[in-house]
Amino acid sequence: LTAVPLVIVPSCMAFSSSLTGKKPTFLKMSSTAEAPAVPEAPETAQKSLRLGIFGGGTVGGGIVEIIQQKAKYFNELTTQNIDVRKICVRDASKPRDFTVPSTTQIVTNYDDILNDDEIDVVVEVMGGTTDAKDIVFSALRKGKDVVTANKALIAAYLPKIEAILEEVNSDGSRVEFRYEAAVCGGIPVIRSLQSDFVGDEVSMISGIINGCTNFMLTAMDRDGKSYDEALAEASELGYAEADPTLDVG
């Protein structure tokens, strides 16, 4: 096998990065809170893939918008309707900068999603490594697939997550954990390495593969902004983590 250096230089504006802007302080999990009534989704002969999203900020809202904009394409691609059933946020009364679908319920209690047997996939874009870890661990143990854009969580807990997956799938189940969105601004690097380079030995990946860093360098080079100005803009637009050191050290 030939060693193949792989050089990747992604766009600084790629969507679905793990940069979630301000990290919300979510309400703690509680099994005693009564969930409000869920609006009924339109009946359909096709199967629906039901999502519960943790985080309604820049990334969470962007996910909802893309699902709405490309609903027909996703339906043709998967023969399923992607149905965002619930979005868990810190403050349900806060105005959103995206259109919430009529069949989507805004909740503040983690268990409203975790204990909902109808939800197939949990999308974690709230950030951090405390509550997010508990949510991901719990969702996997409940047999729900998990998608995350949280690179800090993956860096800290991937071995434990893999151990949970091995445990829950020991009976033949196929619970999955996907984290493509946490790397390289959502550019499909991980999937490419797993499927397209299986015949090669990749010895190095070189490039600026952090969306926030790319955004800042572009702002400094093209727009003449200072480091602090570029970082402040990245934070305001949601490209930087709530703790910017997770992006720029």
Image (cartoon, rainbow, N blue to C red):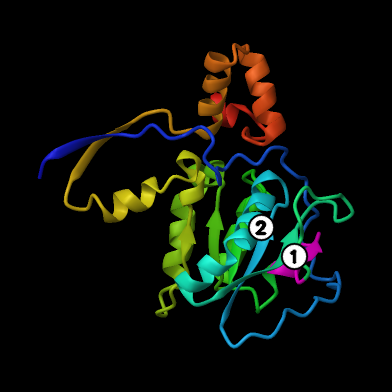
150 versus 165 height, above or below: above
Quadrant (top left/top right/bottom left/bottom right) for the C terminus:
top right
**In percent of the image, x 52 and y 43: which residue is there?**
151
Which is nearer the eye, 121 or 101?
Answer: 101
Residue 56: give x, y in percent of width and height: 73, 52
129 versus 140 height, above or below: above
Which is nearer the eye, 156 or 3?
Answer: 3
Q: Which residue is mark 2?
A: 64
Question: Image quadrant of residue 93?
Answer: bottom right
Say what secondary structure mark 2 lies in.
helix
**In percent of the image, x 49 and y 42: which residue is there?**
155
Residue type highlighted by circle 1: Pro
In screen coordinates, is 31 left or right of 186?
Answer: right
Q: Is mark 1 in CB contact (under 8 Å) with mark 2?
A: yes
**In percent of the image, x 56 and y 82: which residue is there?**
47
Other-residue count near label 1 (Cα within 10 Å), few / some / many at <14 / 14–19 / ≥20: some
Magenta residue check for 112: yes
Q: Which residue is mark 1?
A: 101
Say what secondary structure mark 1 lies in.
loop
Give the mark nearer the N terminus: 1 vs 2: 2
Quadrant (top left/top right/bottom left/bottom right) for the N terminus:
top left
State the extent of the magenta-drawn residues as a range: 103-113
Magenta residue check for 109: yes
